[in-house]
Image: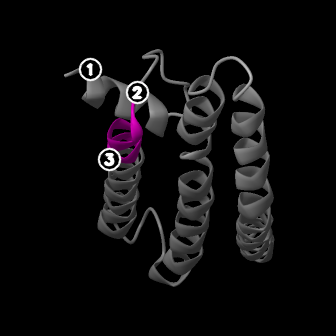
Amino acid sequence: MLIYAVSFTSALLIPPEHEGFGVLDLMWIVIVSDYVLKLATVLLKTVIALMPHSFMHYQNRGKYFLVVEMGSQLYRCLAPIQPWLSYLLDGYTGPPKVLGVFFSAAYMVCKGPDIVTKMKCFQGAIIKFINSVVKIC
């Protein structure tokens, strides 16, 4: 039950309070939180698809879907950072702590370009959405 609570808080970008978790726990947290975020995205897209025509025109739904999808991808890209950094930085004590810091820095260097790409895609989706709203009004 503790693992489910940790994975839920991890999906909300809240650092896990459980200390000393292993690699399998880390993988479980990352996989389950990603799955929960995917399901939340599908649920949100379903709500958008089920809205009546009088509330949201069919032609504009694509813009909403684009914003939801790009936001979801950005959030899913950011969600595993906290558990990984917590594992890498808290997993080592004493002199090997330098190794944990090195691994954390390497992780962030590898993750950085992906985050920047997702942020640019999300920014483009927001700009397309705002431009379509301005043209309608």
Label 3–label 1 contact, CB within 8 A: no
Kind of residue at disc 3: Val
Residue tagged 1: 2
User: Whole-percent x and y of residue 97?
Assistant: 72, 27
Quarter of the image that includes the N terminus: top left
Residue tagged 2: 21
Q: Is residue 84 above or below residue 59?
A: above
User: Is residue 27 one of those drawn in magenta?
Assistant: yes
Question: How far apart are the two marked residues, 3 and 1, measured between alpha carbons?
Answer: 13 Å
Marker disc for residue 32: 3
Q: Which quarter of the figure has residue 74?
A: bottom right
| Element assignment for label 2 | loop
User: Whole-percent x and y of residue 113?
Assistant: 79, 67
User: Whole-percent x and y of residue 4?
Assistant: 26, 30
Highlighted range, magenta: 21-29
Q: Which quarter of the figure has residue 117?
A: bottom right
Kind of residue at disc 2: Phe
